Amino acid sequence: MSGIETKNDVEERVKRLLGEYLGIAPRQIARENDLLRDLSADSLDSMELRQQLEEAFEIELTDSEQNSIPRVGDVIDVIWQHMEQKRSAGSSKTRPSDIGSR
């Protein structure tokens, strides 16, 4: 997950992963593309892509999230939400160096 700082970073990485898996140039993939209709992914592709995305971004997508992400932009948004949650969870933990400074 290192190197992912912005939503644009997430978008580039998602498009690259989709492109590699589906054999499409990432520059041809748009946020508006429907995974099934526009990119010709089938249900098996969807499951495989889910695993690849979970591993690449170190997240776990729920079944309901997977079912609610028909477009590339939806995938990017859900992954970004997970990353933001992880970031805020990590920043709310108390570090040992913080204890003495209170």
Image (spheres, grey):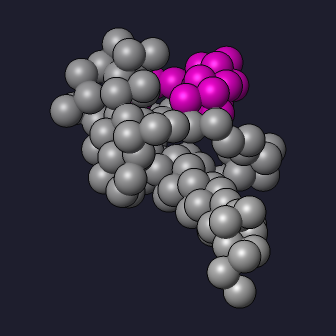
Q: Residue at x 38, y 35 (%)?
A: 13
Near-viewer residue (70 or 56): 56
User: Dividing the picture into quarters, in which one does residue 22 lie?
Assistant: top left
Q: Is residue 31 visible?
A: no
Q: Position of residue 73 (x, y in %)?
A: 42, 53
Q: Residue at x 31, y 40 (%)?
A: 12
Q: Compared to 24, does 27 lie above or below?
A: below
Near-viewer residue (99 or 61): 99
Residue 3 colored magenta?
no
Q: Compared to 7, does 41 lie above or below?
A: above
The stretch of residues the image draws in magenta is: 39-56
Quadrant the C terminus occupies: bottom right
Q: Residue at x 26, y 29 (%)?
A: 26
User: Dividing the picture into quarters, in which one does residue 101 lie?
Assistant: bottom right
Q: Position of residue 87 (x, y in %)?
A: 59, 61
Near-viewer residue (49 or 58): 58
Q: Position of residue 44 (x, y in %)?
A: 67, 18
Q: Residue at x 42, y 27 (%)?
A: 18
How many labels were placed on the picture?
Answer: 0
Residue 51 colored magenta?
yes
Outermost residue, left direction?
27
Q: Compared to 73, does 93 lie above or below?
A: below
Magenta region's main secondary structure? helix
